[in-house]
Amino acid sequence: MENYKLQTEGLRKVYPGTVALDNFTAGFDGGKVHAIIGKNGSGKSTLIKIISGAIQPTSGTLRVDGSEIKMDTPLDAFGKGIATVYQELSLIPDLTVLENMFLGSRNRGRFGFIDQKSQEKTCRDALSLFEEVISKEVTPHCPVNRLTPDERQIVEILKVLIRKPEVIILDEATSSLHSSQVKILFDIVRDLKKEGTSVIMISHKMKELFEIGDRATIIRNGETVATVELDKSSHDEIVTHMVGEKYFTKEKTNRNINEEILLEAIDLSAGNLKKINFSLKKGEILGLSGLQGQGQSELLQTLFGNNANYRGKLALGGRELTLKSPGKSVKDGFAYISGDRKKHGVFLIRSILENTSLAYLRKSGRLIFKRKKLKTDVLPILERLNLVFDGLDSAISQLSGGNQQKVIIGRWLMTDPKVILMDDPTKGVDIKTKEELYSLMKKLCDNGVSIIWNSSEDQEILQNADRVLVFNDGRIVDELRKDRLNEYELYKAAMV
């Protein structure tokens, strides 16, 4: 057995109905950067949570310096010399930079009291590593809630570094950083390698992995499929391992799409979106894909009027639009369907009738309506969606998640939309309801409606979209159509 700093053997994690990680085996050397690579849902997050002590594996073993260990909490992991820099920050906004850095620390001075002078010096020394690329306002006593996202990420990194762990996990730690900040982080990582620290890196930025990484283990469907030396590998080889030798290719559906351009965006920028250009044909399903959180949802929110400070131009049917508010977007012919039903969808204490008719009444501007007439209008819509329910006056909370999603779809169909914006609408619904939704989407498009569809499930978007725009860091980096509608092309474009 090789003498790895950290070793995993047959790690497996099973949740009810789901195998999140299956037989993951790898060794992590001291003085090396070892990347973990995999597509959405491959098991990377589960693996990191196990190694960091946040969750326990269903089976399998962990070894540190050859000795088997068991960890019930992140504190146990830290006691074994393992620390994690998370993508989702663990900082407390109302505390200062110094307080966050030493939160939970056992650092004590004489007689067991906190050595504040020593802590402040340590904090200032740590911040000085990034002093050229952060504001001068970032001091030990500055509250974290005053920092920018990149500065918060730096504090998260330094919080781990000052503890000098033997194994450091960087979980998408560069996602919020600017290029100059990444350069400094990588210089720090190179110094850590010289000191013998083992660095485990999760990143979707292939360029970064080849720049700083030594070795990579690729996960597919929770299993270890390959471990490669990065100086002897290539972008294409890694993507092939990720998706498999026989990657999925879309079967031709031969949908007849009108060549008429319904919607056109020119240099659309808002928030993290950077000069988005695309067109949408009448009757087309346009997919938005790539790794999650790269601007897909932000584009849909902007089109629906939730980013009033946008730049660029948008035209619908040749008429230029101003994206002032969701109310105006609805009047212009947009509808928005979210996969987050609790946040952007249903009103659980209200009836099916009220939930279905809400947008229709708002768009009509009518203050008075006849309930009997409203029921007559709603029923055909819900029957078209194959919704099973006791009555329109029943609370929507009595329906399953999939049927609640059907009500939301019905809500927007009542507004007679021109463009439906779908933001991961199949999240948390059963397979049968998904299939019904795919069929409905195509029927709507056959009747002249156009759809822009973001999905976190690569297979469904490749199977059902007519074209797919691949996003990376707020930009459209590729457009997939026809024979290029497959996982290999998608991840080759997304992971650059």
Image (tube, rainbow, N blue to C red):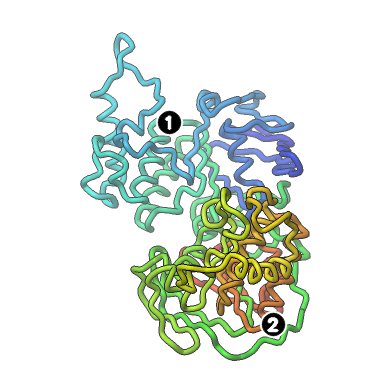
Q: Position of residue 378 (x, y in %)?
A: 64, 68
Q: Position of residue 375 (x, y in %)?
A: 64, 66
Q: Residue furthest left?
A: 136
Rendered residue at 63%/80% (across/down): 284
Choose between 433 and 391: the one closer to the eye.
391
Labelled pair 1, 2 in contact (Cβ < 8 Å):
no
**248 w.r.t. 232: above or below:** below
**Image check: 274 left or right of 337?**
left
**Image check: 356 left or right of 118?**
right
Q: Position of residue 2 (x, y in %)?
A: 68, 33
The crowd level at tag 2 (other Cα within 10 Å; few <14, some 14-19, many 20+) is some
> Which type of secondary structure does the marked residue at label 1 adopt?
loop
Is residue 228 visible in this depiction of the protein?
Answer: no
Q: Which mark is residue 164?
A: 1
**Image check: 416 left or right of 430?**
left
Rendered residue at 57%/52% (across/down): 350
Nearest to viewer (mark 1 / mark 2)? 2
Q: CA distance from mark 1 to mark 2?
A: 60 Å
Choose between 306 and 145: the one closer to the eye.
306
Mark 1 or mark 2, which has the lower sequence index? 1
Residue under numbered circle 2: 446
Residue type of the residue flagged with mark 1: Lys
**173 w.r.t. 479: above or below:** above
The crowd level at tag 1 (other Cα within 10 Å; few <14, some 14-19, many 20+) is some
Choose between 207 and 468: the one closer to the eye.
468
* Residue 287, image quadrant: bottom right
Choose between 114 and 403: the one closer to the eye.
403
Residue type of the residue flagged with mark 2: Asp
**Image check: 139 left or right of 179?**
left
> Which type of secondary structure does the marked residue at label 2 adopt?
helix
